[in-house]
Amino acid sequence: MDLTTLETLVEEQDGAVSAWVPFRDCFEVRLRHVTRKDLASMREHCSKRVYRKHQAETVLDEQRFAHELAGTILDWRGLTQAVLETLFPLKPGVDLGGQELPCTDANKRYMLEHAYDFDAFVIESVTDLERLREARVERETKNSSALSQPS
């Protein structure tokens, strides 16, 4: 069997895989799997050519890439002010009133651009199909055991 004939099938199946993955045991992020090919395409789409000392150089537009990468983040939970304070300094007087930060496009991009290691975590997680599958199986196992226990 030739793997090139399976490529489109694999990409369609992998694109549908998503799971809740813990970030530093602080909060959970629901991520959508991205194939290596799609990630490379994302990077290429977000690259720009600049000239330094008359030499052409290709550089990644970080903000544009964060915007593209934000599409792989489907949701999050547990991202509170206490968690945010461990990720980057907040302005004095900021108070979320104990509520979780909503998972909006603007918040996703801000987290990717400013929270140390969050972008690397997302890139590593969305391309690691096995990690996403394990996280999904672990979550399903945890949920099924919680439902089967008598109250």
Image (tube, helix red, strand yellow):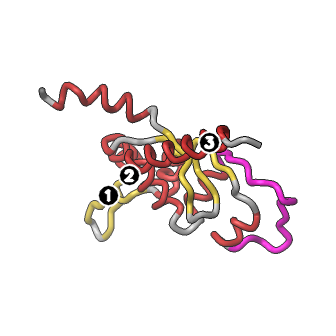
**Do callouts 3 and 2 mark residues in contact (Cβ within 8 Å)?**
no
Lower sequence index among marks 1 and 3: 1
Q: Which residue, given by chain and number where applicable, does mark 3 sit on?
A: 143
Q: Is residue 49 on the magenta stretch? A: no
**Do callouts 2 and 1 mark residues in contact (Cβ within 8 Å)?**
yes
Q: Which residue, given by chain and number where applicable, does mark 1 sit on?
A: 58
Q: Position of residue 137 (x, y in %)?
A: 49, 43
Q: Is residue 104 on the magenta stretch? A: yes
Tag 1: amino acid: Thr
For marks 1 and 3, give the one nearer the viewer. Answer: 3
Tag 2: amino acid: Ser
Q: Which residue, given by chain and number where applicable, does mark 2 sit on?
A: 47
Q: Is residue 136 left or right of residue 107?
A: left
Q: Position of residue 62 (x, y in %)?
A: 48, 58
Q: Is residue 38 left or right of residue 98?
A: left
Tag 3: amino acid: Asn
Label 2 sits on a secondary structure element that is: strand
Determine which quarter of the picture holds residue 10.
Answer: top left
Label 1 sits on a secondary structure element that is: strand
Q: Position of residue 22 (x, y in %)?
A: 56, 56
Instruction: Provide the residue span drawn in magenta.
Output: 89-106
